Amino acid sequence: MTSSIEFEPLVEFPEDPFDAARIYLSVMAYPELGAGQPGGLGVPFIAALWQYAVWDIRKARGLAALREKFRDQTFESPRKRDFEGALNRGIARLERRSAAYTIIGNQLVNGMLNGILRAQELVRDGRDIEAFVRPLGDDRPNPIRSQIIADETPSPRKIVQRDLPAWSKRLGLNTTGASADPSRKAKDLIRRGFIESRPVLHLAHGLNMILADDQDKLHGWGEQHWLLILLWNCDAWVWKALDLAIAWREVSRFSDYGLPSTEQMIELVKPKKCGIMHPAEDASSIS
């Protein structure tokens, strides 16, 4: 499969954690080439992330505190209706990237289980040397041959085709094509949901790992919308998520199990110095 979009080949991250978090989220939502340039698809979303954070300060502390923060007695807080549309469109895209990432997980799990079953079949047929790296009885670790797992790993389209309604809902996309042609429907969902997400699946991996392992470090989790919590706690997650994303992209270089290739994902450049701030303790520090 080839990518159906042209994407940014490289993204450099700034030292400021709030700006880095906004870029992380906006690139994950809008990886298209030029999306971050003036007039680009992602510009309204990255602006909406700032407006959302400022609007929340206004709601929590009042306009006077906000004006004091910005040292401008004429400063006017963004109105929710001014950014809500762009924010919701970006959130829908972020959720689609996360759903596309779970397709990879399904592939890997199915490939491993199918590979085990195939290896058992080969052993029953007396062909264990085809199934394992070493003959049975060898005391050393004896993994299943990687080619067997690769051969038994289903394609993204096969994963999606097994339950079109569920994947359509998870990807936030309607199915298209003739009702009697599930293969065409699956192909369309993969094109719009998976292939268009592929350049940033490593970013989805980084964020998903943070949400799985480090929720206790995200002050206020479960009390407000998850995106707002990420903005409040930007330095608690963005640098680790970026490390995880960079590592996952590099690992794909050596994988035979269906991961996107390194060249199919955006190269991410972490700043030499990673800034620290604590917006969860003092939300007015957002600037």
Image (cartoon, helix red, strand yellow):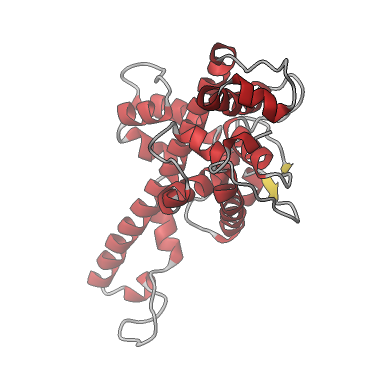
Front residue of this view, candidates 26 and 163:
26
Q: Position of residue 196 (x, y in %)?
A: 56, 32
- Answer with the quarter of the image where residue 17 lies: top right
For the point 60% across and 20% down, which residue is it?
63
**Which residue is more in the foreground, 153 or 73?**
73
Quadrant in which residue 186 is drawn: top left
Q: Is 112 in front, or is 197? A: 197
For this orientation, the residue located farthest to the top is 81
Q: Looking at the picture, how far across and down is residue 162, in whole percent? A: 30, 36
Tell me the quadrant of the picture where the C terminus can be found.
top right
Residue that sits furthest to the left in the current view:
124
- Image spot of residue 21 (x, y percent): 62, 40
Can the viewer see residue 35 in this picture?
Answer: no
Tell whether 114 sits left or right of 105.
left
Q: Position of residue 113 (x, y in %)?
A: 31, 57
Query: Relative to residue 145, is residue 185 depicted above or below?
Result: above
- The image quadrant of residue 8 is top right
Q: Residue at x 50, y 33 (%)?
A: 227
Can residue 281 be seen here? yes
Count of all numbered marks drawn on residues in the image:
0
For the N terminus, the image quarter is top right
Compared with 116, 57 (above or below) is above
Left or right: where 165 falls relative to 80? left
| 88, above or below 5, in the image | above
